[in-house]
Amino acid sequence: MAQHAPLVRPPGADAPPTCEVPHFAPVHVRGGRYQLRRLARHRRRAIAAGLAMTAAALVAAGPGNAERARGHPASAPPATSASTAASARVRGPRAVETVTAPVRIADGATVSLLRPGDRVDVIAADSGGEVRVVATGARVTEVPDVGATDTGALVVLSVPRTTAARLAGAGTTSRLAVTLR
C-alpha cells in the first residue's frame, strides 16, 4: 500500500471571500436632546431638594462633642495675664446690634429639626440656579408652631440689622434653606 501525502492548504484558505460592508443609516438615540430641557425646567426643585438633603445630612451627622450645646462653639481658654485680657478687649469684635427676623424656609421638615439656641447658616437658591449664603451663624430664637405649608415653614432668627435686610430681600426672590452649624 502506498502512503499518500497529507493535503496541505495555505492558511486562511477555508475563510469566505471578502465582500463590501453595506452602508447603514446613522443610529439616533430617542429622547436624548430633550433631557437637558427637562432638567432645566426642574432645576429649581432639584436645587431645593439638594439643599434640603445637605441640611438633613449635616443635622444627622450631629455635633462632634456631645457635652457642649448644639450650635455653640467651645468656650475659649481663660486669659493668662491682665495684659493679654486688656489686648483682647481692644482687638476683640465690637458689639453689634441684633434684631429678630422671621424667615420662611422652603423645606418645612428642615425647620422641624431646629430648636431655639441653634446656630444656622441661611442659603438662598435663585430661580436662575445661583446659590449663595445670605447669613452665617444666625441664632434661632423661636420656631413657631404654625405648621409647614406649600411655601415652607417659619423660623425666627437673631441676626445683625444688615443681615436681616439681606434675609428679607433674599426671601422675596429666592427659596431659602438652612444648615445647622
Image (cartoon, rainbow, N blue to C red):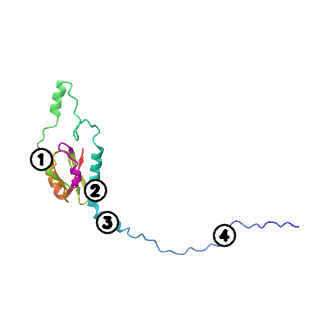
Q: Earlier in the sequence, mark 4 or mark 1?
A: 4
Q: Position of residue 139 (x, y in %)?
A: 17, 44
State whether the magenta stretch is mostly helix, strand or loop.
loop
Pick whichever, 149 or 52, lies toward us: 149
C-alpha gap between disc 3 and disc 1: 40 Å
Which residue sits at x=27%, y=60%? 45
Q: Earlier in the sequence, mark 2 or mark 3?
A: 3
Disc 2, disc 4: CB below 8 Å? no
C-alpha gap between disc 2 and disc 4: 60 Å
With 110 as the anchor, is 4 left or right in this view? right
Disc 3, disc 1: CB below 8 Å? no
Q: Which residue is mark 2?
A: 49
Which residue sits at x=66%, y=69%? 15
Mark 2 neighbour density, 10 Å: few (under 14) some (14–19) many (20 or more): some
Task: Relative to 166, say whether 118 is above or below.
Answer: above
Disc 4, disc 3: CB below 8 Å? no
Mark 4 neighbour density, 10 Å: few (under 14) some (14–19) many (20 or more): few
Q: Which residue is mark 4?
A: 15
Q: Is residue 133 visible?
A: no
Quadrant in which the C terminus appears: top left
47 within the magenta span: no
- The residue lying furthest to the top in this view is 81
Span highlighted in magenta in the image: 106-119
113 within the magenta span: yes
Q: Which residue is mark 3?
A: 38
The tag on residue 100 is 1
Pick whichever, 72 or 17, lies toward us: 72
Pick whichever, 67 or 41, lies toward us: 67
